[in-house]
Image (spheres, rainbow, N blue to C red):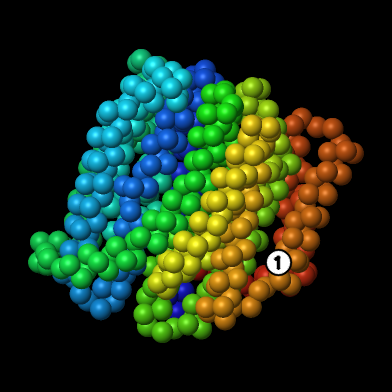
């Protein structure tokens, strides 16, 4: 395996492992909040968080992606002064942007609390979430820099720390004094603690003091030229990710917002598979494109798509088959109402898992405008569908809108990738894998009809049988071979 291949396997395994741990921490965090807050208070926090999160796009301005892209290039070219300059340009511009947003919120805080959130307590929650936003500028820029330097182990800690540090603080509040403000305070302090931990680590990875800060208008222009399309794409992504919550807040109730903010992150657990591979591919694809290794990039893209599909499909089908059980056990009977919406979201998340890989490569090879176009189209569809469906169907309508948007991004990204790196659609491989997935679901369905067991015993026994049959079919249908599996596992264990 080439050096690039080893870096991909090593980096993807780090990110995958810590993404699972982050998902577990995030799930435990939401479990504790759902169990210790009323559905209304739970919905209040996530309404405020979604609102600020939606406008936080103007914090990043697409410059995080630009930092990753150009630092990866400058590292290959050994232009270290430009790396230092890029980092501080991005940091200063983002801080200025967040400061402007915070000033605006200062003057309309009371209005938002009473007339949008419909709860005067939202004012206090909003201030702490804004504090989190400001500190997250430092936090995210540090992680993006580590990412661009291809320290995948440290970057893999990003989401894990973002979830785990607030989780520890939530536990502390539960043991002392816990109320509706506690989640917002925990996220603010969590971002601050994470930043203080990661800054010295970044200094050990890149010696800023060794290089000069170079005032360069052309460099700033280059960052913005790449960042603006990423910004527009991110606006589209945020519309898809946040607009459903915002419209549910406006058209429906905080209770429905609370339920939706349980099922959405449950469905997006599937993103772990695409995120692990896509995160590694972004800086590495930039490197391969700079070195004009197009065939190598195409080969890695095909393999990562194949294995992301193979490994994510069983996880989706287990969650789909036992959606009510998961919601009832972890969050309570009142959240079971979201089971149908969860099943719909799972398929949307599945397509987006594969889309993340496409988009990482497109960004890495310098095609942010293509990403922008597909996200803007998908976000317009999302807005229209949310506006039409949410008043009628509530969270089910939101799930349909989001899933359709994710599928649109996957479809357009795959078409674009096939043209740029002359990648053929692996339709035969897709159909075989989906057939194996269909057998997986049928086995669970038939076993549940024939045998009546304890629900958790059903989950363990029936899923295990289905996974074994699924893997056998993957091999019999020649989607993958035993040798490929063993080589992949050996490379991961050798890291």
Label 1 sits on residue: 430
Residue 481 shown left or right of residue 175 in the figure? right
Residue drawn where x is 35% and y is 57% of the image? 62
Residue 204 shown left or right of residue 344 in the figure? left
**In the figure, residue 212 lies in which quadrant?**
bottom left
Give the total of numbered labels.
1
Q: Nearer the viewer, residue 283 or 130?
A: 130
**In the figure, residue 477 lies in which quadrant?**
bottom right
Q: Position of residue 293 (x, y in %)?
A: 44, 83
Quadrant of the snapshot with the C terminus: bottom left
Residue 125 is at least partly visible in this image: no
Residue 187 is at least partly visible in this image: yes
Q: Position of residue 85 (x, y in %)?
A: 17, 63
Residue 487 shown left or right of residue 61 in the figure? right
Q: Nearer the viewer, residue 248 or 383?
A: 383
Please, what secondary structure does the residue beneath circle 1 have? helix
Q: Residue furthest right?
A: 450
Q: Nearer the viewer, residue 483 or 224?
A: 224
Residue drawn where x is 14% and y is 61% of the image? 208
Q: Nearer the viewer, residue 15 or 212?
A: 212
Q: Position of residue 392 (x, y in %)?
A: 68, 32
Q: Is 330 above or below relative to 486?
A: above
Q: Circle 1: is it few (<14), some (14-19), or many (20+) Cα within 10 Å?
A: some
Residue drawn where x is 33% and y is 26% of the image? 109
Residue drawn where x is 60% and y is 45% of the image? 384
Q: Position of residue 462 (x, y in %)?
A: 77, 43
């Amino acid at each position: 395996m080439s050096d690039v291949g080893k870096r991909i396997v090593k980096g993807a395994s780090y990110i995958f492992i810590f993404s699972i741990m982050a998902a577990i921490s995030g799930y435990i965090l939401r479990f504790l909040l759902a169990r210790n807050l009323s559905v209304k208070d739970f919905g209040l926090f996530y309404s405020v968080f979604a609102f600020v999160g939606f406008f936080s796009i103007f914090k990043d301005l697409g410059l995080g992606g630009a930092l990753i892209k150009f630092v990866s290039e400058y590292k290959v070219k050994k232009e270290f002064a430009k790396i230092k300059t890029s980092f501080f340009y991005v940091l200063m511009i983002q801080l200025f942007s967040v400061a402007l947003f915070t000033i605006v919120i200062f003057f309309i805080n009371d209005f938002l609390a009473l007339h949008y959130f419909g709860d005067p307590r939202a004012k206090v929650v909003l201030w702490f979430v804004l504090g989190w936003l400001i500190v997250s500028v430092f936090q995210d820029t540090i992680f993006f820099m580590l990412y661009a330097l291809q320290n995948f182990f440290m970057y893999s800690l990003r989401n894990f720390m973002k979830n785990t540090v607030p989780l520890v603080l939530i536990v502390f509040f539960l043991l002392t004094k816990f109320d509706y403000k506690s989640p917002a305070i925990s996220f603010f302090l969590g971002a601050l603690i994470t930043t203080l931990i990661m800054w010295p680590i970044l200094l050990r990875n890149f010696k800023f003091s060794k290089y000069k800060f170079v005032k360069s208008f052309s460099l700033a222009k280059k960052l913005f030229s790449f960042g603006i399309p990423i910004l527009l794409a991110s606006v589209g992504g945020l519309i898809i990710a946040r607009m459903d919550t915002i419209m549910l807040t406006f058209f429906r109730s905080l209770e429905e917002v609370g339920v939706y903010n349980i099922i959405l992150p449950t469905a997006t657990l599937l993103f772990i598979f695409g995120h692990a591979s896509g995160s590694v591919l972004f800086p590495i694809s930039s490197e391969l494109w700079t070195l004009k290794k197009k065939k190598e990039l195409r080969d890695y893209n095909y393999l990562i798509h194949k294995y992301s599909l193979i490994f994510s499909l069983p996880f989706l089908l287990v969650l789909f088959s036992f959606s009510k059980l998961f919601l009832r056990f972890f969050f309570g009977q009142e959240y079971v109402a979201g089971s149908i919406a969860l099943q719909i979201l799972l398929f949307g998340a599945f397509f987006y898992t594969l889309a993340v890989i496409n988009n990482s490569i497109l960004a890495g090879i310098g095609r942010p405008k293509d990403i922008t176009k597909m996200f803007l189209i998908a976000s317009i569809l999302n807005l229209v569908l949310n506006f039409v469906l949410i008043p009628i169907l509530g969270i089910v309508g939101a799930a349909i809108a989001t899933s359709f948007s994710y599928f649109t991004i996957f479809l357009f990204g795959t078409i674009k990738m096939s043209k740029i790196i002359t990648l053929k659609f692996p339709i035969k491989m897709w159909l075989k894998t989906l057939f194996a997935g269909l057998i997986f679901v049928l086995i669970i369905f038939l076993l549940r009809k024939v045998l009546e067991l304890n629900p958790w015993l059903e989950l363990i026994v029936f899923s295990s049988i289905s996974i074994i049959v699924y893997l056998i079919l993957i091999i019999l249908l020649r989607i993958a071979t035993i040798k490929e599996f063993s080589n992949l596992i050996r490379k991961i264990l050798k890291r």
